[in-house]
Image: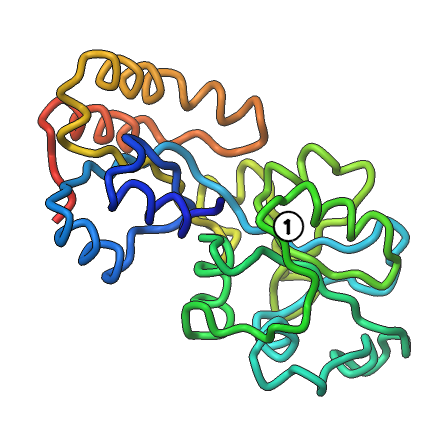
Amino acid sequence: SGTGGGMAKICTGEVDITGASRLINESELALCERNGIELLELPTAYDGITLVTHIDNDWVDHLSVEELRSIWEPEAQNQIERWSQVRSGFPDLELDLYGPGSASGTLDYFTEVIVGERRSSRPDYAASEDDNVLVQGVRSNRNALGYFGYAYFEANRDRLRAIPIGNDPVQAVLPTQETISNLNYRPLSRPLFIYVNANSIERHEVNDFVAFYLANSGTLAADVGYVRLPTDEGLLAARRLEDRELKT
């Protein structure tokens, strides 16, 4: 259901644990407070939001943050509709956009760092909460540009092209395990979290599951294409669980 859907469920007591690809926001904290629910906030891995095109796209060598803003800002609706409008020298082909749906934390994070305001995006693109749907859309459309989590690119790297981000092709940075981990892939590297209902954690099965999750998230994150936390951040998450450190 996306980060927004998961946060709504944990803040109304429907679930004990939810994943999140962004920090909890003020309205969600207020919802939790109204329902008497306190949360533990536990970082689990890093991700890099990845811009992708069709594998046969041979004209995009990089995109700048300014160009991404010009594509995705609300004012681009009915204005930026062809690749040639993004940069002089790009072909005069339709620009078909794919991205996460309205309940997605990826949408929240992307719009905040690229457009400058969370959830401020042009609406005229093919949207889905299921990143596999977005992968399929970009794979089948030579004119496509889309974005989603790095893990989904990693699983489809022989079928998609990742686009380096930067002001010129020399300085532009591709998302990789290394550039995401050391935060050189800017501004699209981000932490991932789980949030846990503080009352639920007192049940041994919930506590044991979350402890297992944190102990194994580094290895399993790498297996599926995310980036494991540095050792000190992983220890911090485990300490937050042990100390029952609440999100305030």
Q: Is residue 224 above or below residue 29?
A: above
User: Residue 108: where, in percent of width, then height?
Assistant: 44, 60
Give amino acid for label 1: Leu
For mark 1, what is the residue? 174
Label 1 crowd (10 A; few <14 / some 14-19 / many >=20): many
Q: Front-most of 24 and 235?
A: 24
Residue 155 horizontal side relative to residue 148, left or right: right
- The residue lying at 26 percent from left, 55 percent from top is 28
**Percent x, y of residue 41:** 24, 39
Along the horizontal axis of the image, is 100 left or right of 4? right
Tell me residue 237's x, y (percent): 24, 30
Residue closer to the observer: 32 or 221: 32
What residue is rendered at 25% in x and 12% in y? Answer: 205
Q: Which colour scheme is used?
A: rainbow
As helix, strand or loop, the secondary structure at mark 1 comes to loop
Q: Which of 71 and 125 is in front in this view?
A: 125
